[in-house]
């Protein structure tokens, strides 16, 4: 830790070493109609500052903010941390009947799926339970508030899209419905997965002569119709004739989704639920009937950073404010006891980590930990300092392994082909309407690891312009560092 604090102080003192941007970067900015003021950048080679351009300025980072969330998660929660889902009750079992409520308690389980739920219910069935006389109680109280998605205005025009899912502590299948759409000249055939008790799907889409590859041009937000206790999802808009596509949507209310999934899975096992499905909390005297543990944190971190998964990043961020590290491998993570909101605690956890590593958090703003935000801010200096700390972390191998590899996988799989960075640089990307960013590690031509951070915030950053600028910086770093032979 002392070494990290010393490195941070040395870095801050020499930021003015090189203010200018490399020529290829400055040229592409000009060619794309942007001024140097549109970008903030930092390149570090060991203790040497190669590039420092407005590096202390807080910028919108887009999904590069996931690096903050994932590194602090590894350091704070530990590599054996696992989210957990539990089935509990304080009711007696008489014969084949559970004489009271069954609680489904969420524990930030990133892997909670219909299959997982079915396996947990099978454990109840194998224990001899066939009928639940009480209610199904959904306990999301690990996070405060339990449902931060309720009443929140949509981020953009696609609230049903997966990237916009706002997590809770009991999020099964990410609340997504996968819709298989197949059309002929005259009719549309639909299939919905997973199947849910009491939920059907129908189409009100007009079949049109259009390019199947551009089917999304006619897509409109589906409608959800409630009639006599049943739910119908109705697709709207238009759809090309003779076209087959699949889309995943988040349109059902979460209690209804879980109710439909639970009742269908339980019925298929020969079980019966007499009561209602409702939100609630776990009784103090409840005993465990079945459980599921998610994969270990490094695997979840990898699935967060490689494809840039917003829901997973947001779940990890909230976990930082709700849970402590697993005290013993395999034991239940300890919930934090506090009246503060989970966001407040998560924000404090990250800031305390930054300060402990000598990183000034002035101007730093984190809203949800995913970068899908208009208010999140971090400077290249702060991000660069975090990346340097990542190299010194006990969990550096896990952290680096989570990052996309240039021209190889994740969100970098189609970028920097033909560059010496291809197959070598590990970079987290970030993209919003007016934001393009990269942050990570780039070996130079001599194999020396460089920390690279670049953020473009400009209305002209879209349509590949901002990407060309940040990729040019990465390419420049990858080509630099050659040692001239005598």
Image (cartoon, rainbow, N blue to C red):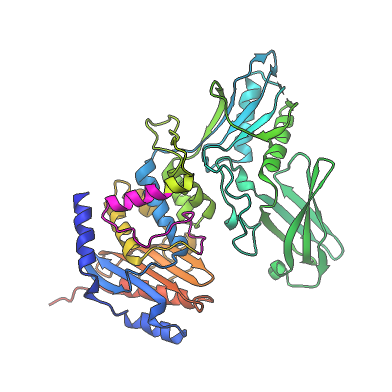
> Which residue of the protein is positioned furthest toward the right in this rendering?
186
- At x 49% / y 54%, what residue is drawn? 368
* Residue 331: quadrant of the picture: top left
Q: Position of residue 54 (x, y in %)?
A: 33, 74
- Count of labels in the image: 0
* Residue 239: quadrant of the picture: bottom right
Magenta segment boundaries in residue numbering: 347-374
Relative to 481, is 85 on the left or the right? Answer: right
- At x 73% / y 43%, what residue is drawn? 195
Front position in the image: 305 or 102: 102
Q: Position of residue 3 (x, y in %)?
A: 19, 53
Q: Position of residue 201 (x, y in %)?
A: 79, 50
- At x 61% / y 29%, what residue is drawn? 103
* Residue 172: quadrant of the picture: top right
> Is 467 located above or below residue 172 in the figure?
below
> Is 287 located above or below residue 443 in the figure?
above
Front position in the image: 424 or 323: 323
Q: Is residue 418 visible?
A: no
Q: Is residue 268 visible?
A: yes
Front position in the image: 375 or 393: 375
* Dominant secondary-structure state across the stretch colored magenta: loop
> Which residue of the protein is positioned furthest toward the left in this rendering?
486
> Which residue of the protein is positioned furthest toward the top in this rendering?
95
> Is residue 371 located in the magenta-colored stretch of the structure?
yes
Q: Quadrant of the C terminus?
A: bottom left
> Is residue 64 located in the magenta-colored stretch of the structure?
no
Q: Position of residue 392 (x, y in %)?
A: 26, 52
> Is 219 located above or below residue 180 in the figure?
below
- At x 62% / y 33%, what residue is drawn? 280
Relative to 396, is 158 on the left or the right? Answer: right
């Amino acid at each position: 830790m002392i070494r990290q604090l010393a490195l941070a102080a040395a870095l801050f003192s020499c930021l003015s070493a090189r203010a200018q941007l490399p020529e290829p970067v400055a040229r592409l900015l000009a060619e794309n109609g942007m001024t140097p003021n549109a970008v903030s950048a930092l390149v570090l080679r060991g203790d040497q500052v190669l590039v420092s351009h407005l590096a202390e300025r807080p910028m919108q980072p887009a999904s590069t903010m996931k690096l903050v969330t994932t590194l602090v998660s590894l350091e704070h929660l530990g590599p054996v941390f696992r989210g957990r889902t539990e089935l509990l009750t304080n009711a007696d079992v008489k014969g084949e009947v559970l004489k009271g409520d069954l609680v489904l308690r969420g524990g930030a389980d990133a892997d909670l799926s219909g299959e997982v739920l079915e396996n947990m219910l099978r454990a109840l069935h194998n224990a001899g339970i066939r009928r639940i006389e009480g209610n199904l109680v959904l306990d999301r109280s690990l996070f405060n508030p339990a449902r931060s998605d309720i009443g929140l205005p949509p981020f953009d025009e696609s609230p049903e899209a997966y990237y916009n899912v706002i997590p809770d502590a009991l999020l099964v299948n990410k609340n997504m419905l996968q819709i298989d759409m197949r059309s002929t000249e005259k009719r549309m055939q639909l299939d919905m997965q997973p199947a849910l008790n009491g939920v059907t799907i129908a189409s009100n889409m007009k079949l049109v002569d259009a390019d199947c590859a551009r089917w999304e041009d006619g897509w409109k937000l589906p409608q959800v119709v409630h009639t006599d206790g049943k739910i119908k999802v109705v697709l709207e808009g238009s759809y090309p004739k003779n076209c087959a596509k699949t889309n995943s949507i988040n349109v059902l209310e979460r209690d209804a989704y879980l109710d439909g999934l639970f009742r269908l899975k339980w019925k298929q096992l020969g079980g019966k639920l007499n009561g209602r499905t409702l939100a609630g909390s776990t009784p103090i005297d409840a005993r465990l009937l079945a459980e599921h543990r998610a994969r270990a944190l490094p695997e979840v971190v990898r699935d967060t950073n490689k494809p840039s998964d917003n829901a997973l990043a947001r779940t990890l961020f909230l976990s930082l404010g709700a849970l402590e590290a697993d005290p013993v491998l395999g034991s239940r993570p300890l919930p934090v006891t506090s009246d503060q909101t989970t966001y407040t605690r998560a924000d404090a956890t990250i800031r305390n980590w930054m300060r402990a590593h000598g990183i000034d958090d002035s101007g730093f703003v984190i809203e949800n930990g995913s970068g899908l935000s208009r208010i999140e801010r971090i400077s290249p200096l702060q991000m660069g300092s975090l990346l340097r700390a990542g190299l010194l972390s006990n969990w550096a191998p896990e952290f680096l392994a989570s990052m996309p590899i240039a021209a190889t996988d994740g969100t970098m799989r189609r970028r920097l082909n033909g560059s010496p960075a291809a197959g070598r640089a590990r970079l987290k990307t970030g993209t919003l309407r007016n934001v393009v960013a990269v942050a990570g590690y780039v070996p130079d031509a001599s194999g020396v690891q460089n920390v690279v951070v670049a953020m473009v915030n400009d209305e002209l950053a879209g349509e590949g312009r901002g990407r060309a600028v940040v990729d040019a910086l990465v390419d420049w770093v990858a080509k630099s560092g050659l040692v001239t032979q005598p």
